[in-house]
Each structure stands twice: as structure tokens, then as C-alpha cells.
Amino acid sequence: MQKTGKLELTWVGKYDEPSVEPRILLEDKSKSYGDQSSENMLIHGDNLVALKALEANYSGRVKCIYIDPPFNTGQAFESYDDGIEHSIWLNLMHSRFKIMRNLLADDGTLFVHIDDNEIGYLIVLLDEIFGRNNRISIVSFKQASATGHKAINPGIVSITNFILIYSKSKSLWKPNRVYTDRGERDKRYSNYITNINEPYENWKITTLTEAFARSFDITLKEARALIKNNPEEIDKFVIEHCESVIQLVNPDYKNVGASTREYIDISRANPNQIFRQVREGYSDIILLGGKRIIFYKEKLKKIDGKYVAGEPLTSLWDDILSNNIHNEGGVDFPKSKKPEALIKRCLELTTQENDLVLDSFLGSGTTAAVAHKMRRRYIGIEMGDHAYTHCKIRLDGVIDGDQGGISKAVDWQGGGGYHFYELAPSLLVKNNKLPIYQINPSYTLEMLCEAICKIEGFRYKPQDVFHGYSSEKRFIHITTEFINAGYIKALSAHLAEGQSLLIYGMKIQSDMVLPDNIEVKKIPKDLLEKCDFESEVQ
């Protein structure tokens, strides 16, 4: 049997990907909104072309990418063609994920929201691009409940979506600690220290119910009735007195250290005394009757501004509801809108304030809205009219102080801004009379220079006679003037020792002898070798 170097998913057209033209971005200042010193971007246009447009300036700078791509369910949605033939869907994802990986910072994270139609293929695809060892988790997200029409048919009712989480480099990935609200009080904490402020040797322990009764100056019978009819009262009592509410737990005797076992043995032999083992760098172990005293306060975590019984984030996200979100953001996006709380969790897990977030399937604008409220920078990409009718309207509302979604949880009061961009048309277009390419007549010289810088991988920054640079020693110059030996000599005078120059021009003297540090290319001939140009001028 022949051995191959790696496992690989293949499909029709995988190796026929086009060489995408990295277009320039044109700001539509009439649609930009709010504080114009902001770096936030809303881009209207095809997301593959837009991602390519970002690659030169943003490679390695994006901390978090969240996308909710078409699920390929075979259904036709109003806003998307979500029934793309299987291999086309894989090509659509493959080409975009490769650019996304380039855009991610070395410690960055990718979240991909998907359902069960393509999850198997998508995992293999992402394993190939990002590396199987960089797969962080597969989260199950409770999207719905087994009610209504979902519960009519026999068999298994599908109520979950999935979020695939990948790091760019797992060794550099440093997530934040995130807790979720358990939703109810942990009733195992049923005891109470009545004199917590005294030395531990003098502590007196009673039941939680008795302590609750004393606080209200009522009988135990009355306290039990109050707890039954108004459980929120004892929940409030437990939170307010969390430093005194405890449970007694049997330690894992076989797996603790020798010194801790000694303390446990002594505690068992003296069941009416409280013993304390002080541990440097760890929480102390307090024992009564051989059992460890665990405090409820250690369970409390501050979530969305209030203290609740928290537990570490798991791979099952069933606490974020997708119902009643149709009004979030003030835009309607049936069956496709994701809860702001979901995006908030992704950003809480992997980002800090001012980090850069990207969503190239922006949809109704949820990711950008949440990033804005959480004071992250963002780039959102969306095609079609709903870039105007959904994303822009939603972000304008956020800047104006929208109080829906996560606003209260993050104390959002409004402010900030974003720049609205359109993708420029193709730089080169076919002549409608001759089988040749020409510069798009809508391009100014400035646009031409910026576009060629992008195509050649230079950062566009006009300075002196140069239009951009790719390193401290490599520069580019673009002109529509005739390039001859004198022109070359004049440009070379601006280069220091060890520096080199790439020149692009439309009219070039043919018999020139060039210095070793200068390269001359012709427009459009040499550009046609760099990428695909498909637009036509009528």
C-alpha cells in the first residue's frame, strides 16, 4: 500500500482557486458615522475580495474572528443562497479560511458557527488549514427548544448548532477565565457559621434554615414556609452572607498530600474541634470531623455586574437563549440573527478592550455591534443591500446609545464611530473593442498607486518620490509618465545604500540598462501575471 504524507479532504475544484485581486477600499463618507478618529470599519462587498483587500495591512493583527457562514442546508433564505452545491460550498469556505488564518494574530482565535449539515467536513477542512493540534473545542449551542412544530414529528428533535473554535497557535493561546451563571442556588451548601468574625477555633455551626429563621426572627416552621413560597428570599440571604454559608465535604484522602492526610486523621480523632492547615500559594484547608469546610463565597462570580453562583465555561452553551432576540439591534433577520450574548461570550473568552475583531459574514451586524459595545475595534464585511439596511442601521443605533442586547450588562451608553467602505472596481478591465486589458477609467492616479501597492504586497504610504514600501530597504514608485534612463537616474538619487526600488509604468524605454537595485515593470502586462481581473468596460 502506498503511503501518503497526510490525511486530506479533496473535492472537485479544490486546486482551481482563482488568484483574487486585492482591491482597494473607498470610503463613502456620507455613510460613515460617529467619531471619525475611530479605526472601526464596515465594508460592503464580496467577502473573499474584501478579505484579500485587508491582507496586506492586517495580516497577523486580528485577535478574534467570529463567522456565521451559510449552513448549506438546501433552503433558500431571503438574504443568502444557503443551498450551494457541496463542492462549491467547500471551495467558498476553503479560500476564505486561508486568508483568515493569515489575518489572525499568532495568539488569535477563530470561531465558526455551523449546524450539523456540514460540520463533519468543516472540521476536516479547518484541521487541514489551521492544524488539528490547534483545534480548541467544539461547542454545542442550544439554538432552540423541543416545542411547537419541532416536537410534532417522531425521532430526534434538532435544537443545537455548533461553534468550532481554533487557535492560530495553541502554544500561544491564552484564553480568559469565563464563568457562567448556574441559574439556581447550590443547595448542598446547607450549613452556616454564626460567628464567622471570631477565630476559627470558636466557630459555631448551625443549619442554613435556622440561620435564615433567626435573621427574620421567625420559627423554623415559618422559615420553611417562607422558603417554599418565596425561594428568592433565601437566595438573597445566601448571597448577602456568602462568607458564612458552607458545606462539609469528604476530602479525596488517597490523592491529597501526606501532611493533609495527617490533618484529616487528627480531625477525625477530634470531631468537635476545627483544624486549619495553612498552605502557601493555595487556599487553606479547614476541617471539622474529618470533613473540609467549603465556603459559598468561593462559588460566587461577578457576571454581568452581579454576583451569582458561577461555574467554569464548558463546551455546552445552553444558557444563552435565542428566542426573543428579533428586536435586538432594531433590525429583522429571521432565523439567522445570533444573540448578542453569544458573541459577548466569544469575545470575553479571547479578547481584551481595543483588540481587533473581524466578521466577514456580518449578517445583521451582531458581531460588530457587540464588539463596539465591549470597546473592541472591529472590521465587518457584508454583501448585498442589508449592509445598508441592517448593519449600518444597527451600528448607527449602537453609537446613538442602543439599550438592547448586552447594553445593560456592559453598561453601554453610546459613542464611538466607524468608517463605511465600498470595494473599488477591478483595476484592469477588458477593452470592449479589442482583446486587451486597460486601466479602469474610473481610477485616479492615487487609486492606481494604492492598487498596485496592494497587488505587489507593498504598504501604500506616499512619501518623497516613493508610493510605498515592503521593508525598510524596499520601495515602490508608480507613474504614467514615460520612463527612460534619465527618469531612472533621478529616482535612484533618492535611494540610500542597500535600498532597492520597484518601478511600475505604462511607457518604458526598451533598451535601458538598469542598476542591480532597480526593477521596472510594465502596466498592464506585469500586473496580469499577479492575479485575476474579470470586470469588463462596456
Image (cartoon, helix red, strand yellow):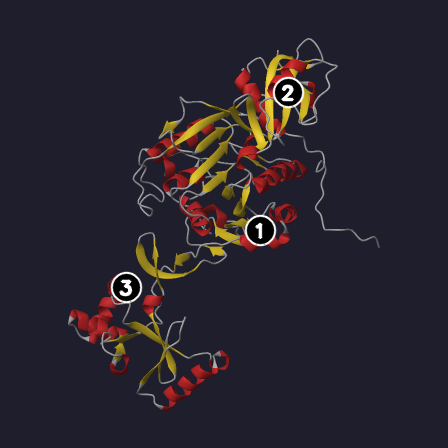
**In front here: 532 or 66?**
532
- Under circle 1, the secondary element is loop
Q: Quadrant of residue 215?
A: bottom left
Going from N to C along the chain, the mark reached first, 1 or 3, is 1
The residue carrying pointer 3 sits among few (fewer than 14), some (14 to 19) or many (20 or more) residues within 10 Å by Cα, namely some
- Tag shown at residue 448: none
Please tell me whether residue 259 is drawn above or below residue 443 in the rendered image. below
Which residue does the numbered mark 1 point to in the structure image?
A: 169
In x, y percent, where is residue 497? Answer: 62, 30
Which residue does the numbered mark 2 point to in the structure image?
A: 504
Instruction: Using residue 451 as the reference point, say whether residue 524 is left or right of it.
Output: right
Q: Residue furthest right?
A: 1
Whether tag 3 and tag 2 are in contact, CB under 8 A, the answer is no
Q: Quadrant of residue 492?
A: top right
Q: CA–CA distance between discs 3 and 2?
A: 70 Å
- Residue displayed at 58% across by 42% down: 101
Instruction: Using residue 16 as the reference point, say whether residue 322 is left or right of it.
Output: left
Q: CA–CA distance between discs 2 and 1?
A: 38 Å
Instruction: Using residue 406 as the reference point, say whether residue 343 is left or right of it.
Output: right
The residue carrying pointer 2 sits among few (fewer than 14), some (14 to 19) or many (20 or more) residues within 10 Å by Cα, namely many
- Under circle 3, the secondary element is helix
Q: Amino acid at mark 1?
A: Ser
Work out which quarter of the rendered image holds the C terminus and state it.
Answer: top right
In this rendering, the label closer to the viewer, 1 or 3: 1
In this rendering, the label closer to the viewer, 2 or 1: 2
Q: Amino acid at mark 2?
A: Tyr
Q: Amino acid at mark 3?
A: Ile
Which residue does the numbered mark 3 point to in the structure image?
A: 239
Going from N to C along the chain, the mark reached first, 3 or 2, is 3
